[in-house]
Image: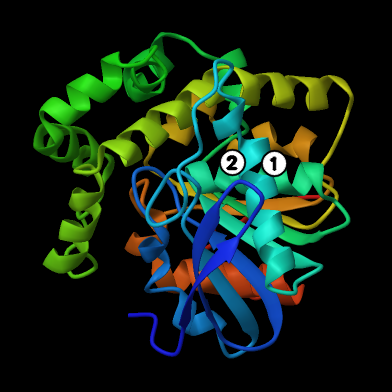
Amino acid sequence: MFEGFVDRFVDAERGKLFARIGGTGSPVLLLHGYPQSHVMWHAVVDALIAEHTVVVADLPGYGSSFRPTPTADHSAHSKRALSSDLVQMMDALGFDEFAVAGHDRGGRVAYRMALDNPERITAVAAFDVVPTGEVWTRADAALALIYWHWSFLAQPAPLPEALINANPDAFFDLHVRALGLGRKQGNYPSELMATYRALLDDPTVVEGICEDYRAGAGIDRTHDDADKAAGKHITCPTLVLWSASGALPKLYGDVLEVWHPWAQEVRGRGLDASHFLVEDQPDLVAEELLSLLDGSHRPPSSPQRKERT
């Protein structure tokens, strides 16, 4: 796993970020989602490193990266703050311009990075998400049941932290695994699942997760709503992928239609996968990423792709 990659702790203004770096060519930053770490990209990176310098990183608050100190307005865990940390990391690694792709929370950091740094981001991919502002603006009874963890994790400290820390096994088995983690046989070896489960044994990670969602319910939404009101768009090529049988089609119908006002050039498709589509379908994800990164439109492996420009 990650053969040929070099492990680095990279300084940013707020703390050290953990990253693995491998390959040659134009740079791409890969960001993980909740409640995982950079390891989730293990089955994709080998397809990218022949043409690209690949940087996989732990988000601040997760994995081996620094833990932001919580603030009353949760701005320390905002996607704007996290994206700034990661841009500083890429600066320190010598990359003035780069592409970024993220799954779940990492997808939210990725699109925020593209909105805040249009001169730096050459392409962006966001997997199994719609913009945070859209989630809260469109919230209804269906979302309350399907995305119940959004409101649970955003409750004031220390309620969600105390409940998760009291029984992390139950939270992992009855919630995280229910989202699809480990469901596709052969893609999730036992040692990988043990790595993900162990993350919840660290109370500082649990705090970071909750602060991440508190930011999502407040300041992240404020940032998104302000950009939408101002007509601000992502200006670089944008790729969105989602679980065809998952929450997004149930909640929003045409997922690309939700994204269309946010990006000048957006394309994507639903995949036959759970929420954890990067690990469920690594070959298809790699194919789509390579198409985005090299600017081509490679023939898809299924006819589900749609495009908006």
Q: Nearer the viewer, residue 152 or 80?
A: 80
* Residue 32 placement, left or right of 29: left
Circle 1: residue type:
Arg
Q: Are marks 1 and 2 in contact (CB under 8 Å)?
A: yes
Look at the numbered disc 2 and give the secondary structure of its residue.
helix
Q: Nearer the viewer, residue 197 or 101?
A: 197
* Residue 165 placement, left or right of 156: left
Q: Residue at x 18, y 58 (%)?
A: 193
Q: Quadrant of residue 237?
A: bottom right
Name the image colouring: rainbow
- Classify 10 Å Cα crowding around label 2: few (below 14), some (14-19), many (20 and above): many
Identify whether 232 is placed above or below 289.
above
* Residue 308 placement, left or right of 169: right
Q: Quadrant of residue 141?
A: top left
Disc 2 marks which residue? 108
Q: In the rendering, at what x and y percent does residue 161 appear?
A: 27, 24
- Classify 10 Å Cα crowding around label 1: few (below 14), some (14-19), many (20 and above): many
Identify whether 78 is placed above or below 123.
above
Q: Residue at x 15, y 58 (%)?
A: 194
Answer whether residue 299 is visible to the viewer in this image.
no
Circle 2: residue type:
Arg
Q: In the rendering, at what x and y percent does residue 293 appear?
A: 70, 72
Q: Nearer the viewer, residue 128 or 111?
A: 111
Q: In the rendering, at what x and y percent does residue 264 appear?
A: 84, 46
Q: Quadrant of the N terminus?
A: bottom left
Look at the numbered disc 1 and give the secondary structure of its residue.
helix
- Label number found at residue 112: 1
Identify whether 4 is placed above or below 263.
below
